[in-house]
Amino acid sequence: MPPPGVCMNIINARHKKDGYGTITNPEKFLNQDFQQLKQYCLIRRVRYIDEMFPPDRNSIGQGILTSSDLARVEWLRPTKIVPNPSFIVDGISRFDFGQGLVGNCWFLASIGALTFQNSILEQVVPTEQKFDEDYCGLFHFRFWRFGRWVDVVIDDKLPTINGRLIFVHSKDPTEFWPALLEKAYAKVCGSYSDMNAGTPAEALVDFTGGVHICIELSDPPPNLWELMCRAGQSRSLMGCGTPQGKTSANTVLPNGLVQGHAYTVTGVKQVMTQGGIVNLVRLWNPWGKGEWAGDWSDNSPLWRAVSPADREMCLSVGDDGEFWMTLKDFCRFYTDLDICCLCPDFLDGSSSCHWKTSFYEGRWVAGTTAGGCMNNHGSFWTNPQYRITIDELLSECSEKQGEKNMLVSLMQKPDKRNRRLVQNLHIGFSVFEVTEEFKAERGKFPASFFSRNRPVAQTKTYVNAREVMEFLMLKPGEYLIVPSTFNPNETASFILTILSKAETHIHENSGGHSHEHMEEEEPVPAENGVDDENKRTIFRQYSDKYEEVDAEQLQMILNDRILKGDLKSGGFSIDACRSMVALMDTSITGKLNGEEFVRLWKKVVSYKDIFFRTDVSQTGTLSLSELRNAIMATGKRMSDDMLNLMALRYGGSSGHITLESFISLILRFDCMYQIFGQLSDGLNMTLRESEWMYLSMYT
């Protein structure tokens, strides 16, 4: 049985600190180790079959093949398709392959861009793989997936009909790197059908783990040409797309372009003609055929007006899917340009100063940290907050006043394995300058801050895309970045990436537990005249001959005596009472003595009072937003991450917390913190296996 997600989160966080999940030490996708599997197959002289992505109809998925075609599919290894298969034939090129039946032009266009950058390509496609004496039907590829690099293992059984590949296929029938790369990415997405429809930006980022810039060509920046030239010189990958037609079909227009289709930008070139300088963009159709028929197309007479040297360098007549057009036509017929790079130096043409990256993972949880956009005045402040300090700009970077110096990217992470099931939320972020009156504030900034201050920068609009980004100019100072969904109460995970030219310091602003020693609560006044002696008298009415109560007796006291009339549900369960006994039981008898019982009673009464004071809606339950205030009222501080966990663990399906759940939550939180304080050095705790099991299984 795999460990719980909270355990895996801790493990993943530790691995990241140790460099696990980097390109040089990628995480093993689905825990499959390529080297171990290869050794296993070689020793036993067997061909690998991937049980995690088996050669069957589930791996193809639904909607791309008819049921009759699905029945005809045969999964064959390359050695069964051709006599002498090769992984790579005469190097890797965008002209090696053409698109198959799945609508993944966005993915293949990105591969086309990838073929221009060998150093990046070899990170994704380990090129040493061969069909040689060590061949065992096993291959692997690497992708960047939401904050970490993963190594993806596949077998080489490929779907065919009548012996022919039905998805991406090489023009040389003996070459198989494109089909195997596509299969590995299909495994990451969930199935081949999960690759249907997308944007080049998604795959470009997954190939590089880099910075993504999206330019809307309907309103391009005035320096678009210079930007594209610098991007081409700085090992950037570029893709673009045409607008969707009236239907989702990829209709070929009279001008040769395909509607709703992804293309690769493969070059830019400035040529001199009799009419002056012309800026040309070269594009490639991942179908491997089908080209632009307008000005500067392969057979355009305009090529006669350029020098023989330029014509020789640029013009290649043939239906290979690649063609030239003017920058003006490019902006006219394409909707957006995606540029992906390892470092955004090309944005301003400056390589004198290096960009520094900060990377944070967070989560919006309905009711606690999903406050929605700024239209939601009462809840916007509950969103995750990140406080950032920008030092004076480095001298080399200060020369150009007003130059943009920060790039902020917000990416939402899917909570489902199958890509087609992922519903992207509308996301965005706002940046606020921290004013003098709030500079001493510690912890989450309250609603009053946002009612008095307007953003100094923000995303232009909330978009239901995987990623949104903005390129900003922020002067040195303190800022607060608030990522949010457009609507409140939408649960999702996200990655916030901040690249800056200046030295920056960033931390989450939710204000978790401090590591100071927590004192026992102040004595609680006697409740309705019930002093400690009266409590002990009541206790003795329920206790056994040893003056102790077990979980069942405690359940009766709590439900029938102490909290009678205050409970909106069935009262404390026997399991909840067993947990309370374990938390308060200092003698490990499974029972509470009189002193332990009185201490528990005081806590229960104190937490009950706080519960009803913070139940402003007077429903007898706490909404998840009220839960935050209730926890603060106990004198405890809880980070957003911990608050989200508590909401998931103790909240009902209605999103509300009952009195019993609140008391159980606070008791456990307090006791576990006390345990950590006793067994740790204040920062770290080490336990032997027996100690960990002893502690966790009883408490």
Image: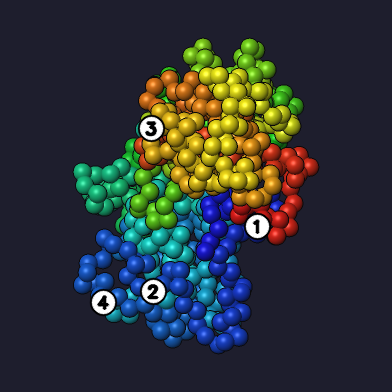
In the depicted view, which residue is nearer to us: 595 or 281? 595
Q: Quadrant of residue 231?
A: top right
Q: CA distance from mark 2 to mark 4?
A: 13 Å
Which is more foreground, mark 1 or mark 3?
3
Classify mark 1: helix, strand or loop: helix
Residue that badge 2 annotates: 55
Q: Is residue 265 visible?
A: no
Residue that badge 4 annotates: 72
Residue 310 locus on image (x, y percent): 49, 50
Q: Which is nearer the N-term, disc 1 or disc 2? A: 2
Instruction: For label 4, count other residues whose C-alpha is less than 10 Å away and answer few (under 14), some (14-19) or many (20+).
Output: few
Q: Residue at 61% of width from left, 36% of height from top?
A: 597
Q: Residue at 26% of width from left, 77% of height from top?
A: 72
Q: Residue at 57% of width from left, 35% of height from top?
A: 539
Q: Are marks 2 and 4 in contact (CB under 8 Å)?
A: no
**Residue type, numbered disc 3:** Lys
Q: Which is nearer the N-term, disc 2 or disc 4? A: 2
**Residue type, numbered disc 1:** Met
Instruction: For label 1, count other residues whose C-alpha is less than 10 Å away and answer few (under 14), some (14-19) or many (20+).
Output: few
Q: CA distance from mark 1 to mark 4?
A: 53 Å
In the depicted view, which residue is nearer to us: 360 or 130? 360
Residue that badge 1 annotates: 693
Q: Which is nearer the N-term, disc 1 or disc 3? A: 3
